[in-house]
Image: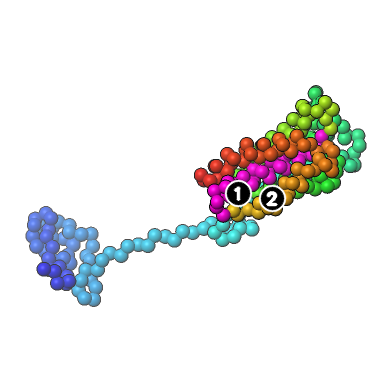
Amino acid sequence: MSTGGPDLFVICKSCGSEVSPYITECPYCGSRLRKRAPKIDREGRVAEKRRRRPPAPSLPRLRHGEIPGIRADSRPYATIALVVAGFAGCVLWRTTATIRDELVVAGKPWGHWWRLFTAAFAYNNTGYAFAALGTIALFGWLLERRHGPLPVLALFLVGGVGGIAATAAVYQVPVVMGANGAALALLVAWAIPDLLELRAHQEVDGDLLGTAAIAVVVALMPLVAPTASWIADGVGVLAGIAIGLPLARLHQEA
């Protein structure tokens, strides 16, 4: 029956002799009992081996603008490039009359396919430019933080350039410019995760009312800017749904 005190002896595994628990070699056969003698506490008992604490996790040196424990967000370079290009197109339209016809889609663009791209960055209406580029800047930045630059560029191409191409295909003599379709594509793609949460009766983080107000302003641009296209609006919404749904699913699984 154990009394809680130190062991009086241990059994040597080689010769079976009873030996002191405080020695490292058997005095009868010379076999090694342990690598080092055990530590004895004040009460004469063998002290248990202390386990080493695992090293505390350490963070690398903080970069400029980084909060401790949080990775610094990279700049939304794709969104910045799209907005800067839009402002440049707006300035060129107002200051350089000789190249206006090369920037926009005025008539069927057969043989001038590049105008489908340049027209997405040209604006002849300051309010139209402010609404479209402001929406692209806001929701492009939010999407690029969440998914990176490629989805932002894809949404701009499909919603903006695709909307202009669809308008040119439908109208006999189309006159279209600006990226209202791209703005709506980015807006819809960003709002889809919140709409899915709202449908599932979950708490929504985003401001859907503010987003809806911006969407209405952009969608009604053809009323005040004849070069904005209703067809581009529809293409932008469809592009936002088609690209935004898979992005939302991937974001939920991640």
Residue in view at x 85 percent, y 30 percent: 106
Crowding around mark 1 (Cα neighbors within 10 Å: few <14, some 14 to 19, many 20+) is some
Residue 92, image x, y percentages? 86, 40
Residue in view at x 82 percent, y 42 percent: 223
Q: Which residue is mark 1?
A: 194
182 drawn magenta? yes
Q: Quadrant of the N terminus?
A: bottom left
Would residue 39 be seen by someone viewing this image from the given angle? no
Task: Identify the coloring.
Answer: rainbow
188 drawn magenta? yes
Q: Secondary structure at mark 1?
A: helix
Q: Is residue 112 above or below residue 64?
A: above
Residue 164, image x, y percentages? 76, 33
Tell me the amino acid under the disc marked 1: Asp
Residue 29, image x, y percentages? 10, 57
Task: Give the number of the disc on residue 211.
Answer: 2
Q: Are marks 2 and 1 in contact (CB under 8 Å)?
A: yes
Residue in view at x 60 percent, y 54 percent: 205
N-term mark: 2 or 1: 1
Give the magenta range. 176-203
